[in-house]
Amino acid sequence: PSPRSCQPTGDSEEVLQYEIEELKQKDLALDQEIAQLLSEGYSLEELEKHITLLHEYNDIKDAGQMLLGKLAVIRGVTTKQLYPEYDLELSD
C-alpha cells in the first residue's frame, strides 16, 4: 500500500503528527542519497547544478507540452497525434 493509503483518519493533530513523521522519513532518505552520491565522488556544487538544470529542463518541457496541447486543440487532434509530426517520442 502507498504511504497515503496508510494515513490516519483521526483528528487533525494525529494527521499532522503522521505527516511530520512522513517528512522526517523523506528527509532521512534524501540525506542518505546525498551521502551516497558524495561517497561516489560528486560534489555538492555539482549536485546543485544538476538540480538546477533539471528544474530548467522541466520548465521548458512543461512549456512545450502546453504549446503542443494548444496546437492540438486548434487542429482538433490529440497531442499524441502531433508527436510524429515533430519527431517526438511518446516518452519525451
Image (spheres, rainbow, N blue to C red):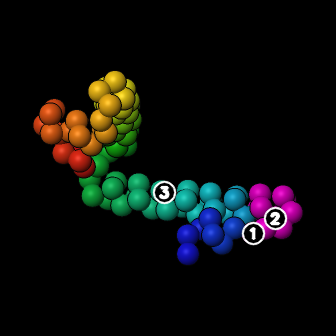
- Tell me if residue 11 comes above or below residue 69 in the rendering: below
Find the residue positioned furthest to the front.
Answer: 76
Expressed as whole percent of the image width and height from the top left, the position of residue 29 reads 49, 62
Sort mark 2 into few (<14), some (14-19) or many (20+) by Cα contacts within 10 Å: few
Residue 32, quarter of the rendered image: bottom left
Q: Callout 1, which amino acid?
A: Pro
What type of secondary structure mainly makes up the magenta span? helix
Residue 89, quarter of the rendered image: top left
Q: Which residue is mark 2?
A: 14
Can residue 52 be seen from the camera position used here? no
Which residue is painted at 15% across and 39% down in the image? 84
**Magenta residues, start to end:** 8-17
Find the residue positioned furthest to the bottom.
Answer: 1
Q: Which residue is mark 1?
A: 8
Sort mark 1 into few (<14), some (14-19) or many (20+) by Cα contacts within 10 Å: some
Expressed as whole percent of the image width and height from the top left, the position of residue 56 reads 35, 31
Secondary structure beneath label 2: helix
Foreground tag (3 vs 1): 1
Secondary structure beneath label 3: helix
Which residue is painted at 78% across and 68% down in the image? 9
Can residue 31 be seen from the camera position used here? yes
Which residue is painted at 66% across and 72% down in the image? 6
**71 and 18: which one is in front?**
71
Q: Which residue is mark 3?
A: 31
Which residue is painted at 55% across and 75% down in the image? 1
